[in-house]
Amino acid sequence: MMKEDYNFSKIEQKWQKIWEEKGAFRSIEDPQKKKFYCLEMFPYPSGRIHMGHVRNYSIGDVISRFKMMKGYNVLHPIGWDALGMPAENAAIQRGIHPQKWTSDNIFHMKRQLKRMGYSYDWSREINTSHPDYYKWNQWIFLKLYEQGLAYRKKSKVNWCPRCQTVLANEQVIGEKCWRCDCQVIPKEMEQWFLKITHYAEELLSGHEGMKNWPEHVLTMQRNWIGKSTGAEIEFPMKESSRSIKVFTTRVDTIYGATFLLLSPEHPLTGELIKDSSEKEKLKQWMEQNRKAYPGDFTPGEGEKEGIDTGERALNPFTGETIPIWVSNYVLMEYGTGAVMAVPAHDQRDFEFAQKYSLPIRAVVSPDGKPPSSKLQQAYEDYGVVVDSGPFSGQTSKEAMEKMARYAQEKGWGEKKVLYRLRDWGISRQRYWGTPIPVIYCEKCGIVGVPYEDLPVRLPYDVEFKGGEGSPLDKAESFIHTTCPRCGGEARRETDTMDTFFDSSWYYFRYCSPKENKLPFRPEDVSYWLPVDLYIGGVEHAILHLIYARFFCKVLRDLGLTEMDEPFPHLLAQGMVTKDGQAMSKSKGNVVDPDDMLKKYGTDALRLFILFAAPPQKEFDWNEKGIEGTHRFLHRIWTFFQQNMGLFQDESRESFQGVLDESSYKRLETRMHQTVKKVTEDIEQRYHLNTAISSLMEYFNQIKKEKDRLDQNEKGVQLLKEAMEKLLMLLSPFAPFICEEIWESSGHPQPLIETPWPSFDPEMAKEETVTIVVQVNGKLRDRFEAPRGLEEEQAREKALELDKIQSLVGNKSVKKVIYVPNKLVNIVT
RNA sequence: GCCGGAGUGGUGAAAUGGGUAGACGCGCUGGACUCAAAAUCCAGUCCGGGGCGACUCGGGUGUGGGUUCGAAUCCCACCUCCGGCACCA
């Protein structure tokens, strides 16, 4: 038979075509079969796939193909997160319409993904820029609006001057825009918000059940939600009937509250300092902060400053008169915008009190004894409450409980839980997003677009000039409409939705991508969801992943699903870097997957990116490595070419040699061990790198034993079986080469339809084992023994060894520890 | 500052419930094939000392302690790096 060279590009084309024509990975609901929903975060169609995609999607593909062979009904979909800024920027810079730019990119990337051999069900492909998709964004928005979960409010928001739009809090990373990295500035605007805070507690408590999420992602979400438990207390003002509400997590220190502080933006501030000689200071603060991120009054290590209002309040617990100050370190955005200052037990208040010579009174001590010496700094720990009237002597914990209850009884306070999480601002002043389906009417006010009028389509014919305002602001035919309620003249909302809205529910849409009465069919969703494995990068930990959890709960409360959490299992894959840095165009260190495909082929690239490091870990690209996996595949190809004869029946008569029993046994054991190892690595640990290394070892072993087995019929049978199993086990990682060899060695049914091999745990155990002998815990010698050797014999055997004899000599043996099939430790 | 994660050869990494540290790759060294090179194949490769040698002795998983017959793995303290939050009351 002709020996063929390993021509990977020919093989790739052949199998791509076969899979394409057969619709090989189409999935159909089948209640008889166990389902497995494997999802990878869908890409933004930027133009080309990058190594991060290759890694993400290769992991998902191995799992999917593995589950298919295991007999699961696998849903492995893909689509396009196709709305967003880059398309619009291309329009402004290069005059290409966002729609064309997007669809060109999708066309190209789709070809790349197919070339990667990913087992996607292309019949379920979705595209969020298509009206068939964003119609349902609008539908969901209207439902939220009806429930009061979408509302409009004027407030200070994050404005990105480069993107010319507002950003949600989650999209501001350390005062910078998540997308373009430029400084965000505060701006007062009217905006649509989604009430994610309504679910704050559930988003937090839901973590309890999320055992299969990486700890650091949960931590990030927990920090973001930022729950704090405390009390709200009202301090009556002395000279007026008004009062000031404060939030505190330390009511137990309230007897030490010696003054109140207001935020510069507190509603009372302006009025209270009207007559102050220092009111200029306030203006100055405001001036300074115009440039800064909202909620950050004194960026960096700003000096704490204050203005005495001259007004007085009463501490409701002590009845004492205390001054009211305004200070630049009190945030309006958190709590009530006012705090009770307890300088003895809060370092910030301590510094402030020292600067302005305000009284400092300790009311908590570690041991319940009043602190004698003067405080050098605030004592912030919990302890025992002192000098606090009837509460003295209680622990901080007790006191917090009892004081809050007392305040509540008296009617000037209550227990209170606060979250750092803010509502999600979804209005964007840009074109390439979902139009918010709302109409403004002079007479009727805000009116939702009727469901039957959906979708509100993006007008195609608009001008892209950049600069201030959305192109929709100038699209007269889009803006002018009639009020659905009164029929009078009205105006459409021109803001579009944050594109994170689209990705918050796309995993539902995959279940019924063509449905046209609802966003998805509840029965399809109840079959496929939840997502059994969700794979993506950590960068979405508090963006997409928290929004998506929120939407799941919203859709549940709308009665469309029964599920509380959509992603019980999250695999957060590590970044692909080059020379320790993120790959980026500006750094010029991008490795293009296409170049690698040309040089080494798809299978080698897939194999390498999975082999180099475990999926969770960051991984630095190194071209030498891919050469290694390419060589491995090449060796496999050559080996099978050279031994194709084994798969042909006619040469049987020549196999008359004597069977090498020990070689047979070795290979047989290794075969079962490898099936076990690969299966468990994929299924239980997602350690694809060690699965691949065990396949390399296995192949090395096959090569080594081959000459000892190929002269005998029984040996040849095993050899054949071992080689077949190698292809089965390797096929999820390197599907092209495996299918090709499988077919040419006479297997009519493709590997993807072949059941995953099983193993016999007994057969996977070695017959003889190496037992290590230690003396006092130090490795000294070893011996071979049959598996299952009794302790008595093991001990005897170990003590008989010359080396052990010379070490132990006449010393008395105190103890012998025996770990069956592993080790003997002699303690003297 | 608070909360999380991680530190293992020249290098990417293995070691799955405390039991042979460094599997499998990459790189490097030597050899085979070749007029030569590339490719390929074979052997070696944690560090240090001794022996021509099959070998042998000592050290070794960020640092210092501890628990244990035995620790990369468990406990305590610390150092470094990465990520998140941060004048959040």
Image (tube, rainbow, N blue to C red):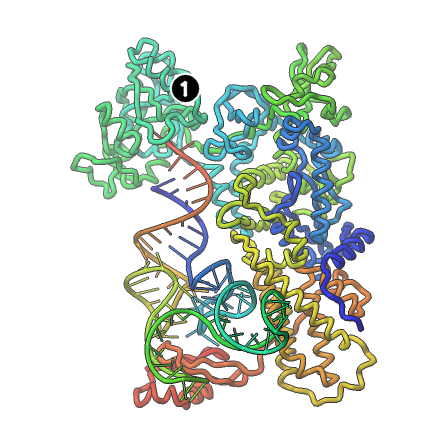
Task: Look at the picture and state if A101 lies above or below A57.
Answer: above
Find residue A720 and report its image quarter: bottom right
Q: Position of residue A494 (x, y in %)?
A: 65, 20
Q: Is residue A15 depicted above or below B56 in this figure? A: above
Residue A233 in sight here = no
Q: Nearer the viewer, residue A814 or B28?
A: B28
**Residue A529: x %, y % from top left:** 68, 47
Q: Which residue is mark 1?
A: A265
Q: Is residue A117 left or right of residue A174?
A: right
Is residue B26 placed above or below A416 in the rendered structure?
below
Indicate the chain on which mark 1 is placed: A
Query: Residue at left 71%, top 53%?
Result: A117
**Residue type of the residue flagged with mark 1:** Glu
How far from the left and from the top, in percent, is residue A376?
21, 36
**Tag 1, which secondary structure?**
loop
Quadrant containing the N terminus of chain A in the rendered view = bottom right
From this viewpoint, is residue A98 visible?
yes
Mark 1, other Cα within 10 Å: few <14 / some 14–19 / many ≥20: some
Please tell me which residue is depicted at 78% across the width and 75% down the height of the picture: A647
